[in-house]
Amino acid sequence: MRSARDPRDARLARLRASLEEAGLDAILVSSRANTRYLTGFTGTSSMLVVAKHETILITDFRYRTQARTECAAVAQVEVEGVSLWGRLWNVLPKVQGVVCVGFESAHLLHGDYQRLVETGIRWSWRATSNVIEALREPKDESEMVHIRAAVAIAEEALTKTIPEIAPGFTELEVGANLERRLRELGSEWHPFETIVASGERSALPHARCSQRALRNGDFIIVDFGAISGGYCSDITRTFVLGKADGAQREAYDIVREANATASSGVRAGMRGRDADALARDYIERRGLGAEFGHSLGHGIGLEVHEAPRLAKTVDMPLPLGSVVTIEPGIYREGWGGIRIEDDVHLTAEGPVLLTSISRDLQELG
Amino acid sequence: MRSARDPRDARLARLRASLEEAGLDAILVSSRANTRYLTGFTGTSSMLVVAKHETILITDFRYRTQARTECAAVAQVEVEGVSLWGRLWNVLPKVQGVVCVGFESAHLLHGDYQRLVETGIRWSWRATSNVIEALREPKDESEMVHIRAAVAIAEEALTKTIPEIAPGFTELEVGANLERRLRELGSEWHPFETIVASGERSALPHARCSQRALRNGDFIIVDFGAISGGYCSDITRTFVLGKADGAQREAYDIVREANATASSGVRAGMRGRDADALARDYIERRGLGAEFGHSLGHGIGLEVHEAPRLAKTVDMPLPLGSVVTIEPGIYREGWGGIRIEDDVHLTAEGPVLLTSISRDLQELG
């Protein structure tokens, strides 16, 4: 038995409305996150067909039990032993009234597209973009419960790890301890490779954990997240090991102020470029614009990078109900870097900060 | 300064020979693993063009320092602030003598393929398959060093974790401890989500770690790996918590014998289907063929699943020098499952087992 208000029913209904509006009889879903959003399936191998009256999930033997447990309430589950594509060509002709089928241009590989046009000749295939991703932008309450849980796990794990950060430990040791706590606290997996970047390595915005040992005077960037019910959190804090010097303090304060300005000023309905400018204009006024080389943020949800984007090239408005990161940073080669990243829910009442762990400059060790 | 015998030079030379043979003037590389193999670049965002005399890596601001450090010895690094595709259309016309360009059909998304045919109209684009993947199958000694290190890290981490497995611990706690050790021992990341599947959950070939507490009498499948220098190991062991009963012992022995038969019998040059049959025929003779629902194994290297495949549908021979998993398993719904997975190097002298941790039935706790 499932709840009378299974959110997947509402999602599938909204998708069917989108399909009808676009003149599509069905859509072939390739994206794992989109498949999970619509059906709850958590496996790594599937094809999903959503037609007017049918929802069909094709998966392989390995996921037989799991797929039925997760999706039988909303989808017809087809378990295939040899080829998911073979099963598609077997199943699709049985779905009535399907002529024009959308596929996901941003998720279907060229080689699989060739299968559509070579083997699926009896249907008319149309490239679609962002049909399901757009539905995913506003988060419903069942999703917010998971995102808040993912934030809580991440913050508790970091809080427990901070006291252990001391000179002599390697970045990898700090990362390993943080990751163990994330998992023990229930994070289903890691949304991305944990970043612990210290000293001059903190100037690399996407450094991995290395064997570098922490030293007094280092900046330490910790960028990580948790996953709960499939939903991600994404948080960054920057610490100084030992006493911060004047230059560190000055740069940190600029990033912190940029973060605060953007977190409090961001609104649903604002264009992505205008949200980005909240932090960028401030950093530019302080003369460090050239050191803020990435965009301000991105949506989070079933993926750690999803729509919308907060970037200077983006004209699209931020949807009401979306959850975005606010993560200004500055990076100075050979010296170090700072990034402060929060997760913010864009509600009708304004931005709600989901992250609460301190943004003050913390001198550790 | 780089070594006079940088393996990337040999790889690029072999790729250029493949391109010439295929009548291609250049190839656009989208796959991260293929990019890393050819250039050493470890970032997540890049486009690589390999032409007769040029190797050009386009990446974004975040990887500026890293890309130059990792690839400047073999590639011209182009750092782009706005659009990698925009930079491609700027750079490609400057490469002389390029008319026909290959792209990776199994890695290029449909939407990006549309860019090629709509914006890149002055070139002739041709779909390619497995051009670089085929080069990657035989491992050179520089690669074997990393694979052996990844096996050693994984085996040491498991050896340290086994004594802690006891009734009452959750799958997630066992997984978290194993993962922490993997990281502390230097694993760069995890090749896939660690599987700790106990009791009836061990019948799910791709279960994640759950909050299920271990109980006496459980089978416990632990499937995990390490990454060293980008190269993966992939190992599975199955334990019994407490005393194994007769049915558990009997099923375990069948899987163990199937594993031993296949590991000692597999040879370079054998077709994928014949390698698969080494284990499958034995399990079928013992009457459990229906419970061995996946294929025998797969190549490992820069990806944890790469060519070749050991499966009943595969006619391709296993290349000399490749490294493959041998992982027979049986899965009985509601009862449990067993999988024993080793990593094997297919040398001219026969199969060399890289994994050495015990395959005997271990009764833990």
Image: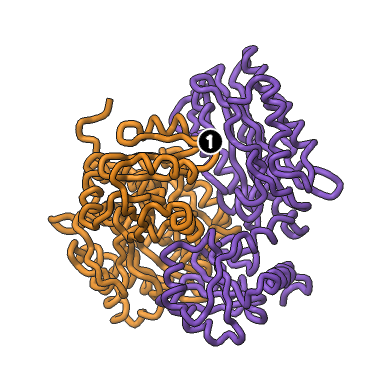
Chain colours: A purple, B orange
- Residue drawn at point x = 47 percent, y = 44 percent: B44
Q: x%, y% of residue A100?
A: 58, 77
- Residue drawn at point x = 42 percent, y = 45 percent: B47
Q: Is residue B112 visible?
A: yes
Q: Is residue A13 left or right of residue B309?
A: right
- Residue drawn at point x = 65 percent, y = 49 percent: A300
Label 1: which secondary element:
loop
Specify the amino acid type for callout 1: Gly
Q: x%, y% of residue B315?
A: 25, 72
Q: Is residue A203 left or right of residue A71?
A: left
Question: Which residue has dot 1 on it?
Answer: B81
- Within 10 Å of disc 1 (Cα), the crowding (few <14, some 14-19, many 20+) is some
Q: x%, y% of residue B276?
A: 28, 71
- Residue drawn at point x = 67 percent, y = 81 percent: A53
Q: Quadrant of the N terminus of chain B?
A: top left
Q: Residue furthest front?
A: B122
For mark 1, name the chain.
Answer: B
Considering only vertical position in the picture, is A32 above or below B48? below
Considering only vertical position in the picture, is A60 above or below A275? below
Considering only vertical position in the picture, is B237 above or below A220? below
| The image quarter in which residue B260 lies | bottom left
| The image quarter in which residue B313 lies | bottom left
